[in-house]
Image: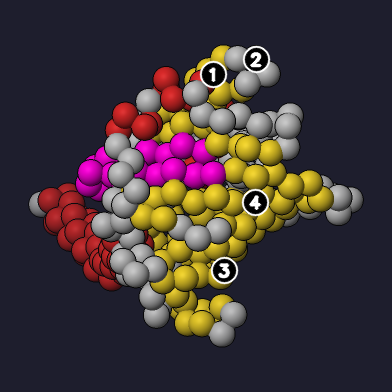
Amino acid sequence: MQLNLLNKTISASILGAVLATSVAFAPVQADEAADKQKGFDIAARSDRSDNGFTSSEVEAIMTLVNAAGRETTRELSFKTLERENEDVGDKGLTVFSTPRDVKGTALLSHAKILEPDNQWLYLPALKRVKRISSANKSGPFVGSEFAFEDFTSTELNKYEYKYIGEETLDGMKVDVVERFPRYKNSGYTRQVSYIDQDVYQVRKIDFYDRKNALLKTLNFSDYKEYDNGIWRAHTLAMTNHQTNKSTTLTYGEYKFKTGLADKDFVKGVLKRVR
């Protein structure tokens, strides 16, 4: 009988401890779930502010600065076809027009959500189309500080989110949201985005490498609202904190609803674009 009483006492003590632990962790788990949902909601509000542009075309100048401060420039153009819905990614075509050694170089991207993106690079010097494997998407795009995955990484459902808090950035109130890639072979463990509370546009992203060290920062500036209510940043400046190199994209005026269709984003166009 004493043994039974002892067992009951121990069982009651264990049960009490489990209940106490559960009660103690419940608020923490609830807070984590709330932070995830709030982070997603803020990111979704920003992403969905871009809905309805259908297609766009724009020319830009890429300025590369090496660690010694030497600058080189390239001219290029971007064409984008809006996704059908949030389960499908955008399609994009990037073509370089100057200087002569990269003229005709073109990148075709079909963004996916969790499956590997489809990307093909045309190199005119080799006169062949090279498929970019998912394992190489973290590599530099044409010597710039942008990675191949940076051109397809804006899809909402590619990430899990966590709300961090509020800050002031360049005089603006911003929400700080941490996001974690859900797709394989990303070169980043996490990214921290700063989204303004006025028009819900991304103002800055910090990228952390596979060792969770700060790798790059992308600043968005010179925003403009077009007649269709779509906002576009006209200066994107990517700074690599580990190499002291930077790449800035300066965009011209955007054109929307230009009649682009799926046929303009097939591999066959890569050898024809100039």
**Camera sees residue 104:** yes
Relative to residue 14, is residue 86 depicted above or below?
above
User: Considering only order in the chain, which callout, 1 or 3, is on the residue closer to the N terminus?
Assistant: 1
Residue range in magenta is 77-94
Q: Nearer the viewer, residue 159 or 7?
A: 159
Residue type, mark 1 in image: Lys
Q: What residue is at 45 percent from the left and 58 percent from the top?
A: 254
User: Considering only order in the chain, which callout, 4 or 1, is on the residue closer to the N terminus?
Assistant: 4
- Marks 4/2 in contact by CB < 8 Å: the verdict is no
Q: Residues within 10 Å of mark 1 (few under 14, many from 20)?
A: few
Q: Relative to 241, is 91 on the left or the right?
A: left
Q: Nearer the viewer, residue 147 or 16?
A: 147
- Looking at the image, is mark 1 or mark 2 nearer the viewer? 2
Residue tagged by mark 2?
Answer: 126
Q: CA distance from mark 3 to mark 4?
A: 15 Å
Q: What residue is at 31 percent from the left and 66 percent from the top?
A: 228
User: Considering only order in the chain, which callout, 2 or 3, is on the residue closer to the N terminus?
Assistant: 2
The quarter of the picture where residue 38 lies is: bottom left
SS at mark 2 in the image: loop
Q: CA distance from mark 3 to mark 2?
A: 36 Å
User: Considering only order in the chain, which callout, 4 or 3, is on the residue closer to the N terminus?
Assistant: 4
Residue type, mark 3 in image: Ser
- Tell me where residue 16 appears, x and y as whole percent: 21, 64
Q: CA distance from mark 3 to mark 1?
A: 33 Å
Q: Residues within 10 Å of mark 3 (few under 14, many from 20)?
A: some
Relative to residue 214, is residue 232 depicted above or below?
below
Residue tagged by mark 3?
Answer: 221
Q: Residues within 10 Å of mark 4 (few under 14, many from 20)?
A: some
Residue type, mark 2 in image: Leu
Residue tagged by mark 1?
Answer: 130
